[in-house]
Structures are given as structure tokens and as C-alpha cells.
Amino acid sequence: MFPELTRDDVFRLETRRLWLRWPRAADVGAFVDLASDPSVALWTAHIPHPYTREAAEAFVLRARASNGEGLTLALALALRGRPQEAIGGLELTPDGAGSARLGYWLGQPFRKQGYMAEAIEALVSMVYGLTEIAAIEAEVRPDNAASLGVLDGLGFREAGRRIVEAPARGTSYDCLVLRLEKRAFVGAAAARTPGPAARPLPSMSQQRREDPRMTRALALAADQ
Ligand SMILES: CC(C)(COP(=O)(O)OP(=O)(O)OC[C@H]1O[C@@H](n2cnc3c(N)ncnc32)[C@H](O)[C@@H]1OP(=O)(O)O)[C@@H](O)C(=O)NCCC(=O)NCCS
């Protein structure tokens, strides 16, 4: 379960270049435009293709209800300068046993600029700072080089294989399981922080001050 902080739609994460915020009805058009591209849907288990307006509306309603109950954290991605225009999405679903499953996609025009790596790093940082989740996993097809590249750069490591049902594809896939443990993520963050070896792990607020890629704000705001 996610904490009270993420269960309200004023919640957002800010990174150097992005906002991660709750999806809204106003995102439906952008979701349809971007996720209709087969290069998005066909790599995922749950995004139908073709992707209709009805499907996007249903996603937004489900995501908001589920976020509100703390069962998932589904966030739309937007550029900081254009926070109203969604460019992709991420979703984290806890399994109730200490792990959570991560899914994500980005519109084709916005790829290969490090956006998804930046977004996932912020999300993972928040989750490991504020929740009891101890490991995050992504299920990735072995031929999805882009997804594997993103996860590898963030320290996710292969932890086996799993047959994953892909209802939107009408099949199942033999996927790699990529896993990032909290202790590995926190250890790597501490190692990046200059200072004496015995220095205690930085608090979330210290991390945010010291690492510009860390989440700059966890929640907020009357200005949405
Ligand atoms: C996977 C996806 C989200 C990547 O988003 P992105 O913002 O382009 O990724 P980033 O720019 O943050 O890439 C981070 C790293 O991943 C690697 N990478 C990204 N795209 C790659 C590609 N097409 N081929 C190989 N490696 C790639 C690179 O190593 C990059 O590191 P670099 O900055 O040193 O070059 C995007 O390609 C996508 O939406 N794909 C379709 C949906 C999907 O596959 N979802 C995941 C299902 S498991």
C-alpha cells in the first residue's frame, strides 16, 4: 500500500526535466496519440492496440481510483515546461509481499533523451524513502533492448525469468525479471555522495539537495 501522501491527486514528483503526476481526464488525447503507436503498445502487456479513446478514458479512471486507494501508483510523465501535456507513463503495483512491479512507456518523439531513466530514478527514490517496499521488479521481453538499457543503467539486475500474461496481446511472453533491491539502490546513492566512509546515509532531503537528479519535491501544491 502507498502512503497517504501519494493518494491525493495533488501529489507529484519533480525531477530536473520532468513532472510525474497523477493522470487526468485531460491526458486522454495525448495518451491516445502517443500510445496508439505500435512501438509503444506492442512492447507492453496491458496497452491495447489499436488504442482507443474509450480505452484511454478507462485507464485514467482506473488509475485515479487505484491511486486513491493506495493500491497502485500510476503517474503520467510531462516535461517541466509543459506539465499539462503527458508524454508517457509509469505504474508501480505492490505485490503485497514487499516487492512491487514496475511498468512504463514513453511516446516515440521523446525517447533516447534519458527521460525514462530520470523518471524511474525519481520514482524509485521516493518509494524507497517513503514506503516499506523492499524491491522493485520489471518484467521485460529479452528482445526489448531499450527497456533493458534503461533498467541496467539504474542498477536493476537480472533475477530470473517468468511467463507473463499479456492480455492486451492475447498471449503470454517468456520475460526476463529485472530487480532492484532497496539496499542496493540506497548503497549506490550513498557511494555517489562524497564524504567520509562512515558518514550516515543521507536523508531524503539531503539527497535531494546533493543530487540534482533526485526528486526536488515530493508532493504538493495548490498551483495544480
Ligand atoms: C523503454 C523506453 C521507456 C525507454 O525510454 P527512453 O526515455 O528512450 O530511455 P532513456 O533515454 O532514459 O535511456 C536510458 C538508457 O537506456 C538505453 N536505451 C534507450 N533506448 C535504447 C534503445 N532503443 N536501444 C538500446 N538501448 C537503449 C541506453 O543505454 C540509455 O542510456 P544512455 O543515456 O547512456 O544512452 C521507451 O523506449 C519505450 O517507451 N518503449 C516502448 C514501451 C516499453 O518497452 N515499455 C517497457 C516494457 S518492459
Image (spheres, rainbow, N blue to C red):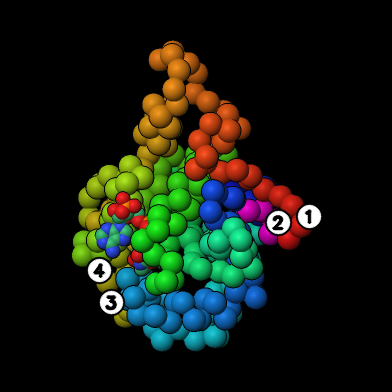
User: What segment carries the magenta color?
Assistant: 8-12
What type is the residue that disc 3 sits on? Thr
Q: Is residue 87 visible?
A: yes
Instruction: Tell me the tag on residue 222.
Output: 1
Label 3 or label 2, whichever lies nearer to me, is: 2
Q: Mark 3 vs ligand 1: CB under 8 Å?
A: no
Sequence order check, earlier mark of 3 and 2: 2
Residue neighbourhood size for the residue with mark 4, other residues' Cα within 10 Å, grouped as few (<14), some (14–19), many (≥20)? some
Which residue is label 3 attached to? Answer: 171
Quadrant of residue 209 in the image? Answer: top right
What type is the residue that disc 2 sits on? Val
Find numbered disc 2 in the image and state the secondary structure of the residue it sits on: loop
Sequence order check, earlier mark of 1 and 3: 3
Q: Position of residue 84 (x, y in %)?
A: 64, 68
Pointer 3 with pointer 4, Cβ within 8 A:
yes
The answer for how far apart the CA atoms under marks 3 and 2 are is 37 Å
Find numbered disc 1 in the image and state the secondary structure of the residue it sits on: loop
Instruction: Tell me the tag on residue 173.
Output: 4
Q: Is residue 168 visible?
A: no
Which residue is label 2 attached to? Answer: 10
Sequence order check, earlier mark of 2 and 4: 2
